Image (cartoon, rainbow, N blue to C red):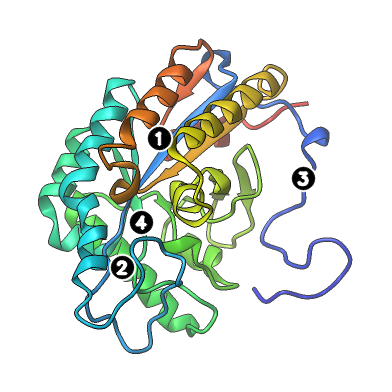
Amino acid sequence: MPAARRFGMDHEHYDWSPFNKRGILRWPDHARVALCVVVNLDHPEWNPPADSFATPFAGGLGARSFPDYARLSHREYGHRVGIFRVLDTLQQHGIKATVAMDAMTAEHYPYLVRHCLDAGAEIIGHGVSLSQMITGNMTEEREREYIGQSVAALTRATGRAPAGWLGPEYGESARTPQLLSEAGLQYVCDWVNDEQPYPLHSPHGALFALPLMAELDDVAALWERRVTIGRYQQLIEESFETLYQDGQQNGRLLALNLHPWLIGQPFRIGYLDRALGRIMRRGGVWAATGAEIVDWYQRNPPTA
């Protein structure tokens, strides 16, 4: 769906919807805030395909000459250590993770797949690898094949097709939402422009955006902007307090995007633990997976 320059929005992926003109969204048990925690398990390849693209802002140690053991092993810390620490922290607060898992992780780390499922996590599509990001340079057929490869890998590994999708580094082309819907996906986390889910346009069935809080993404905050870990805890808590107050009139969504290689470090995890503890001690918070939130939204849309 190519962009067409005009007044207002210059694409037709969704309808513009100013928040103050919407109906009222009510979460289960009249919760003010729906909390969704997305945990990324993405694999950087040692030798990615020659035509692949990876953003230089993917986080981790800076690139060096091949073989770049320091950078690659820094990222793998999340698969070996950090994921268990993060999932344990979420479980202590009664939060089921939504795990964004790429095809290479699903295929080569079966223990992690089983561990996530045993922890009650939802597993959603996350592309093929961290090294292969969707871009507008892909042909439509190549992108369709790429999405199909990711969905098939997760289906084989988990026994069910994923309902959700988060592109590696939020990457999309102008046609990605339609191709995701065509492949059977029901929601996508790449659009970071709201505090509620919303419907996307697709000729292939219902498709929804589940917006993440981009500025609370731990890579964006801790690695790119160099926010201190103590301040990061405060940012989560302050964001929640504002959403909690606003949610008294109209339900809000707090969707955190986390990376175990980063937030799972021993000197950082306690700050996440304290932030989540403060959130979950408040009444009126619904901690749910992405699929649960989108399913509720679809069955109980905002009303006037």
| Disc nearer the start of the sequence (1/3) | 3
**Residue at image location 65% in from the left, 43% down from the top:** 194
Kindly report the distance in space between the C-alpha atoms of the residues bearing marks 3 and 4: 27 Å
> Which secondary structure, mark 3?
loop
Would you identify the image quadrant in which residue 291 lies?
top left
Report which residue position mark 4 lands on: 125
Q: What residue would you read off at disc 2?
A: 129
Horizontal and vertical percent position of residue 259 = 35, 48
Mark 1 to mark 3 CA distance (whole Å): 24 Å
The one nearer the camera, 252 or 14, is 252
Residue 289 has which mark?
1
Tag 3 near tag 4, CB within 8 Å: no
Q: Residue at x 42, y 72 (%)?
A: 133
Q: Which residue is mark 3?
A: 17
For residue 150, above or below residue 117: below
Q: Amino acid at mark 4?
A: Gly
